Amino acid sequence: MYSVYEILRDNWLLLLVGQYPNGPLGGIVATLILSVLGIVLAFPLSVLLALARLSPWRVLRWPATVLVYVVRGVPLLMVILWVYFLVPLLIGREVSGFTTMLCTLVIYEGAYLSEVVRAGIQALPKGQTEAARALGHSHLGTMWFVILPQALYNMLPSMLSQFISTIKETTLGYVINVQELTFAANQINNQLLTKPFQVFFILAMTYYVVCFSLTQLTQWLERRIAHKRLGAVQVQPAAGDSTPLPSPVAAPQP
Amino acid sequence: MPFSDYKTALVTGASSGIGAAVVERLSKEGLKVHALARSAGKLADLAARTGCVPHAVDVSDIAGITRLAQEVEFDVLVNNAGVDRPGSILKADAEGIDLLVDVNLRAVLHLCRLVVPGMVARDRGHVVNISSIAGAYNFGGNSTYHATKAAVSMLSRQLRIDCFGKRVRVTEICPGRVATDIFAHVHGDSEDTYKRFVEGFRAAAGRGHRRRHRLRHRGARCGERGAHGDHAHAAGARRPLDHPARNAARLIPPGPSTPAKGTAHEGLRPAGDPAETGVRRHAAARHAGDAEDRGRLLAAGDDHGCVLLVVRLTPNRIAERAVAGYVSYHRNVPTLVQLMFWYFGIFSLLPDALQGWLSANNAERLLSIVALGLCQAAYFSEDMRSGLRAVPAGQAEAARALGHGYIGSMRHVMLPQAIRNAVPALVNHSVSLFKNSSLAMAIGVAELTHAVKEIESQSFRTFEAYSVATVLYLVCSLLIMAVGGWLSRRYRIAGTR
Amino acid sequence: MTMTTPAPHTSPARDDTMILFSNINKWYGDYQALADINAEVKKGEVVVVCGPSGSGKSTLIRTVNRLEEVKSGQLLFDGHDIHAPMGGAALNKLRSRIGFVFQSFNLFPHLSVMENIMLSPMRVLGVKRADAKAKAGQLLERVGLSNKAGAYPAQLSGGQQQRVAIARALAMEPPAMLFDEPTSALDPEMVGEVLSVMRALAHDGMTMMCVTHEMNFAREVADRVWFMDAGRILEKADPATFFGSPQHPRAQRFLSDLRAH
């Protein structure tokens, strides 16, 4: 295990930031930046997709459903290959591995997140939608003011889970030369050549620590939300709690 | 352009070592191979063995190779002839430098001059330059050798520019230490040399995939750690992914094989191209093997999952913690990293005999099955745990009250209900296991995504190849989901939803 | 009380009709939920709809603001045909004029009481924030919950939540209010506070249609009682007649079952 310490001591900077400033930003910082950007950009897309899937208009519902099914039915690696192929065609010039990975993550995570958002919307009691519509709100107004604020809050733990998945998915950037943590670890392994077990042990443990901590955070958040949403215990109005009700005209005797 | 379109090949330095192996392999693929080397005797043996056409010509004999190039049209050119001398520039002699430059560089340039224009004219060809890790890294070798190999490396990249717009491929191979005679030629033929340079290293027996040359290193002494920078060419070490993008500097442009930007598929599709059937045939063949693997994976994951679940639920604290740790590890470490950990890390810890046996028996596939199976077992066990939690506690109590033991109550009462509850989640994870198999491509397993990449780089038909793969994946995913739905309905408990 | 079978109306019949049902029919698949409903609620009237469970009472009241569709027939609210084909905006406008109170309150849990009441006037009717706030304050006072303006629904009792729900509906200044079993989800001791609010509303002249099991309320406040069973209105009478001497045998059985408790 001393060699593990040695490897860390000699290469911690590479693992942390890649070859920066002598090259692009890499290592775990790049992994985290890629993940955060991916999820943040995927979020609005996912809300739009979820709304499209739940919309009463077929012209929105069908394409959205097809897109989500396709993205979920195909491996991430395949999506990466598609994006790598299509994006330069669409915008007319080559894109870096980082950009490709980011686009891929946005699409992939957008589809998965949209399922989370959709589940959150559908988990709300139907009465909320009915009440909003009964008050005269339009479909979109209902979504914006009543449904989405509740659904998104309830789904925070699931969204955080998806963020953790994104961190794990960034490892595939290795396949297209994106300088993230797995790439850095492979660089070290290719230099050392004789300590693969130690290097990959470090790699696995780094991911473990990051993802495990975030998982704990997710569970704490879940408990907190459940507590808040289920509400305080039903409050019994004590005597004099509410102001006296206006007295009606004396009711006619039966 | 499938491999089958190549008819002739020229291999220099063919009498022994890498050259001879290349001749043998290309002959097996059905090409007419012209073997060029100095020693007529060894060439004759080679010709007898493989049916190649021997040419006892020194590669630095310009007239000789000019004649040969004018006689025959070559589709594949393998510039393999190479020599080395010991010592640094401080101990160099004029004759040594001239020889190295003549054989390692000048001959390569002339052969390219003579052969490549024909390839470009016919819009068909493949140039393979055997350079060396010495072209990229510095260690205690011969400086002229390093220089010539670096030159070959740059030439390979430049050839790409020269051949832009045509379907001519350029491959550069950078071997590390390969068990050939070059060491004997350089350091003297002796026991010592053999021990030092050949036996001290482990060869991966019987794993000659067409384009990869992998060698395992034990105690490599490559001097100073190489430069940071593009480690895509750290050949000699196990190359984890022979993906065009990975070897960006060496192979044809990364990503889809569009020879020229902007003219993506113009004029690249002759009518009635046999490559079209090739695309489908390839995909089908690979996929069959693939599906087999995946079936094995699913079964493995399922069994382990059940075992894990039962262990986790025992009152034994240590067992419970152990399984919780196992599940936690597999859920928090990315699948690709787990695969790498098994393939590189744990493999290196195994006893030598086992390593040898694995290498000879498709280690990638076996190890990826192991890694993915264990990973999915973790997820399956969690799914079944959730399914179990959804079974009312009174069920277990009733079973125990009737006298069943722990295992009995699990087997007859709890698990049947738990599994029914867990089916939707299990189906979801089965689909994701199926998709995770594509990750095995990263350690060289020839599964569907890998096959598609190969087809795409051979046929330049990116859109079609990718579409076929996408449809195949989708069909299988939807099939798994349909089976899950059918299972749900078939085993539904009467009266429930 | 006799029931006439009117010819289908195509134009509002009388000026003081608030809600008019003409030959309303509705099916769920093969099951007929509403059959040949013909009835009207006049302005300022309080109508109570009662009957055994599954009789279609809730379905009927939900057709008024088109939370349920109808298969055939015409439903006029204040002269407008609610079930005519129309654009979304037109339907929303109509709905904003019909106050609806749900059995399960359906307050918006992520908004405070004050915000619940202010939201729809501001966003649907375009009322300015200050005006909406003032109105909300008044309404809270009217239902007796001024001190709960900043509270969240999860912090209120069921009865308090329902009163807020009534205030929320009133904030839209509707000409009529519909109540779908407003007290059925409440603990017995809280029923009274909600009924008091409803009584006060009726006293102030609001047109109300209530589906309820609270027979005392019906007796004291209703102008007319409709009795439904199996999707039909079997009897329409004033409370005294209905509770004193019901005509239809089904109604008689219903009332005797009630009294047996």
Image (cartoon, rainbow, N blue to C red):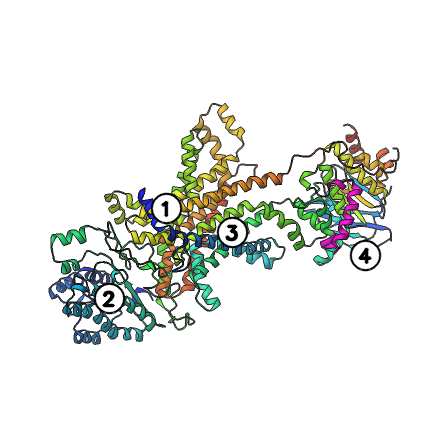
Task: Tell me the distance, in whole angstroms, between the alpha carbons under discs 2 and 3.
Answer: 52 Å
Q: Read off the chain for label 4.
A: C
Amino acid beneath label 3: Tyr
| Residue topped by disc 1 | A202
Q: Earlier in the sequence, mark 1 or mark 3?
A: 3
Do discs 2 and 3 belong to a common subunit?
no
Bounds of the magenta span?
Answer: C121-150
Q: Residue at x 48, y 67 (%)?
A: A91
Mark 4 crowdedness (10 Å alpha carbons): few <14, some 14-19, many ≥20: few
Q: Read off the chain for label 1.
A: A
Task: Tell me the distance, in whole angstroms, between the alpha carbons under discs 1 and 3.
Answer: 29 Å
Quadrant where the image shows the N terminus of chain C = top right
The answer, for residue A99, to whether it is visible in the render is yes
Residue B181 is inside the magenta segment = no
- Where is residue C145 drawn, in percent x and y? 76, 40
In the image, residue A22 sits, relative to residue C177, either above or below, namely below
Amino acid beneath label 4: Thr
Amino acid beneath label 2: Ala
Q: Read off the chain for label 2.
A: B
Q: Mark 3: which secondary structure?
A: helix
| Residue topped by disc 4 | C10
Residue B147 numbered tag: 2
Q: Mark 1: which secondary structure?
A: helix
Indicate left or right for B412 with C229 as reference. left
- Where is residue A165 drawn, in percent x and y? 47, 49
Task: Tell me the distance, in whole angstroms, between the alpha carbons under discs 1 and 4.
Answer: 80 Å
CB atoms of marks 2 and 3 within 8 Å = no
CB atoms of marks 2 and 1 within 8 Å = no
Mark 1 crowdedness (10 Å alpha carbons): few <14, some 14-19, many ≥20: some
Do discs 2 and 4 belong to a common subunit?
no
